[in-house]
Amino acid sequence: MGTSRAWCVYLLGGVAVLVVFMLLPYGMPRDVLYALIAFSCAVAILWSAARLRNATALPWVLMGVGQLAVVVGDSLWVYYEHIAEVNPFPSVADGFYLLQYPLVTGALLLLARHHRSAGDREARLDAAILIVGLSLPYWVLLISPKIGHYDSVLMQVIALGYPLGDVLLLAALVRLLTGAGARTPAFRMIALALVCVLTGDVVFVMLEDPQGFSVSLGVLPFLMSYLVWGAAALHPSAADLLRATPETVPSLTNRRLLTLTAVVLLAPGTLIVQLAFGLELSAWAVSITSVVLFVLVVARMAIMLRRMQHQARRLDEIARTDTLTGLPNRRTMDAQLAREYERATLDGTPLTLAMIDLDRFKLFNDTHGHQGGDELLAGAATAWSLVLASDDMLARYGGEEFVLLMPGRGLDDAEHLLAALRVVTPQRQTFSAGLALWDGRETPLELLRRADTALYAAKEAGRDRVMRAAPAVGRRPEPVNSREYGGPPGAGPAWSAPSR
């Protein structure tokens, strides 16, 4: 039978055996059957670990050895109870029972370590809030009443060992559940099995004589945990416990928020219940827990606010930056141009703007592919940026067009800067540019339009050159040092409608 169905057969068969167990009267046959069910779980887990033979096997080995320790404890319990006819508490059986907690906790912590994510700090704080909040009921209901309840020190230590082991197991389970990682069927079944174990421990401790119930309320959660745990080990997803998942930040969903709220309210809720029913107040426990929870919640809020601020800054940066080249985008350039208008007006300094366009970029794209075209755009942006002064601003205007804003530079100075940009243009590519000097009156749109008109004139004149824009009165643009840029004066277009 394939492993794809083995888990289902095991689970259904276990349910049938569980029904038989419930029908048996209390006695040695029923306790032996109980131990056999636990043994089948340990065998299933260890068989799965042996089958995996990789990093995933170690958590299964720890869980299997922990279950095997429980089986040894059950066997010793049967011996003390039915053969030696002595009280099995305290005994060596308790030592094996308690051994399960650190072993299984170790397995859960191994899983949690592999399930770390970018938001691991938030996950750790959420886990800390849940652990501190849920530990309070354990203290009030299970731990505090047992202190000083036994005459023997050994009995006292063993009696406290079970609820303390539960707190340890609960902490590891919460840490695992609040982290990232694949929520496979095997993962979910392990979590359900551990919840059953914790429930069984609470019921067993709170009920003085759980064996006296006809349906064995004290042991049913344990039996259910064995069946679910064994099925998890046989499930095909047992090999995926350590499967990597995308690095994500745990989102504060409504369910998580409600869970955290409910746990935080456990502290004042405990005090309210004790006051309402006239019970002994756990003032110190509630006070200390409330203080710790308050600090943890504030820390959680502080980290969340810092992350939101970082995301807001990142979104603002994305809104102002071209993602391909890393240059300011058109929106940022428009805002900067308005600021430079004000500065030029106040200081009386020149303001020059150049519209730059890579020559025959469509042909380059068709030859080298879109990825090659993207690399050219990004490389040109990087190379040009290294030449510019701190006051200059290069922005991507769209496609293969760039705008260079040069405050404080006149036309001659701007031409020399464009010549320097031409030298460092990557992949032996050339560009054409239109150069416009602000006349102190025209709008930013009019200045850009004049530079763009000059750019088209440079393209029509043969490319690989800079053309000065005509003044706002409408004089035709003339070439600027065309010999220096590779084109003869007055050179006509290579074809009537050149592509950029």
Image (cartoon, rainbow, N blue to C red):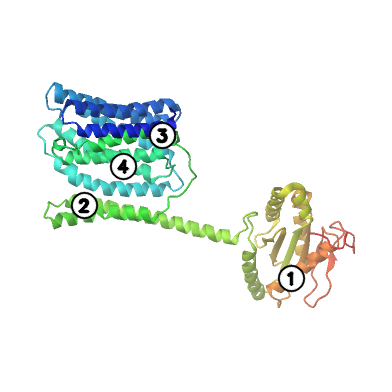
Q: Is residue 168 visible?
A: no
Circle 1: element type: helix
The Cα–Cα distance between marks 4 and 2, rounded to whole angstroms, is 19 Å
Q: Residue at x 16, y 35 (%)?
A: 211
The Cα–Cα distance between marks 1 and 3, rounded to whole angstroms, is 68 Å
Q: Which mark is residue 235?
A: 3
Is residue 198 toward the left or the right of residue 212 in the image?
A: right
Image coords of residue 242 (percent x, y): 44, 36
**Depth-wise, is mark 4 or mark 2 nearer the camera?**
4
Which badge, 4 or 2, is on the more N-terminal residue?
4
Which badge, 3 or 2, is on the more N-terminal residue?
3
Q: Which mark is residue 171?
A: 4
Image coords of residue 207 (percent x, y): 15, 40
Q: Are marks 1 and 2 in contact (CB under 8 Å)?
A: no
**Depth-wise, is mark 3 or mark 2 nearer the camera?**
3
Q: Residue at x 25, y 53 (%)?
A: 266
Q: Which residue is mark 1?
A: 449
Q: Quadrant of residue 47?
A: top left
Q: Which mark is residue 286?
A: 2
Amino acid type for the residue under numbered disc 1: Arg
Q: Which mark is residue 193?
A: none
Circle 4: element type: helix
